[in-house]
Image (spheres, helix red, strand yellow):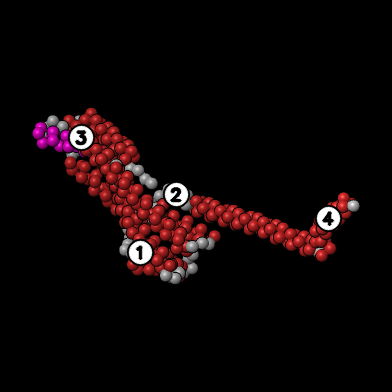
Amino acid sequence: MEDGIARLLLIGLVAVSAMGLVIALLYPYFTGQADIAKRIDNRVTGKVERESLFAGIKSRLAADNRDSRRKQIQDTLKQLEETRRKKRATVRSMITQSGLEMTIRGFWFGSVITGLVLGVVVLIIGAPAYIALLAVVAGALGLPRWFLSFMRKRREDAFLREFADAIDIMVRSLKAGLPVSDSMRVIASETPAPVGPEFLEIVEGQRVGISLDQGLDRMYERIPLAEVNFLSIVMAIQMKTGGNLAEALNNLSKVLRDRKKMKLKIKSVSQEAKSSAMIIGALPFVICGGMALLNPGYLDPLFTTSTGNIMLAGSLVWMSIGVLVMRGMINLDI
C-alpha cells in the first residue's frame, strides 16, 4: 500500500515538473514576448546594419572627397608647371629681374660704349689689333650681361632675406581677420624693397582687374625664384580646393626658413672650396705680376711676338674654362 502511494507521488511529481518545463518553454509564445524580443532583435540588428552601412557610405564619400581634392591639386600643379616652364632669359627679362630702370635701347647703347672703351684701353696698353677686337666683343656682349646677372642675383638675395618675414606678416593679418588683399597691402607698407614693391604691384594690379593668380605669375616673371613659385602654388590650391590659408602659409614660412638655413649651411661648407678656387685662379696673374716687377723684360715676348700672343690667348682660354668648371663644381643650388 505504501509502495503504491509512493509510486503515485513520484509519477505526479514528474508530471508536474514536465508540465512546468513545457509552460516555461511555451510561455513567451502565449504572452507575445517572443514576438517583442524578435522585433527588438530585428531593430537592433537593423540599426547596426544601418550604422555599418552609413559608416561605409561616409568612408566612401570621404575617400571620394580626398580623391577629388587630390585630383584638383594635381590639375592645379600641372597647370602651374605648364606656365612655369623655364624660358630662355632675354635682355628685357634680365633688365626687369635686375630691377634697373633701363630701356632696351639704353642697354645696347651702353654695351657698345663699354666695348669701344675696353678696346681703346687694350690698344693703349699696346696689344695687337685682334686682341683689341676681342676686347670690344667681350666688352659689348659679355660685361653688360654679366652686370645684369650680378644685379639680378643681388636683388634675388635681398628678396629672399625678407620674404619669409613677409609671409609671417600675411599669416598674422589673416588670423586677425583681414582679407588677402589687405594682408598684401600691409606687406607692401611694412616690408622694405624689393619685397614691398613686388606685393604692391599685386595689390595695384587687383585694382585694375588683374586677378591674384595673374599677379603672382607676373611676380614670378620679375623674380624667378622657387620660393615665389611655392607661394603661387599655395594660393592657387587654396583658391581651387579651399582650406585654411593661414595654416598653409604658416607651413610655407617654415619651409622658406628651412631652405634659407640649408643654403647658409651649404655656403659655409663650400667656402673652403671657393677660397681654394680663388687662390688657384689668381695664382697665374700674381706670378706674372711678380715676374714683371722682378724682371720687367722677361715677359715682353708674350705681348710683342705673334707666338707669344697665341700662347697668351690660349692660356686665357684654358684659364677661363678652368674657372667655369670650378664654378660649376662649387655652386650648389637647392
Residue 328's tag is none
The residue singled out by tag 1 in the image is 196
Side of 250 relative to 286 (left or right): right
Instruction: Say which label, 3 or 1, has the lower sequence index.
Output: 1
Q: Residues within 10 Å of mark 2 (few under 14, many from 20)?
A: few
| Cα–Cα span, label 4 and label 1 | 104 Å
The residue singled out by tag 2 in the image is 87
Q: Secondary structure at mark 3?
A: helix
The residue singled out by tag 3 in the image is 284
| Cα–Cα span, label 2 and label 4 | 106 Å
Q: Residues within 10 Å of mark 1 (few under 14, many from 20)?
A: many
| Cα–Cα span, label 3 and label 1 | 45 Å
Instruction: Say which label, 1 or 2, has the lower sequence index.
Output: 2
Residue 129 seen anywhere in this rendered image of the structure: no
Side of 50 relative to 160 (left or right): right
Side of 116 relative to 86 (left or right): left
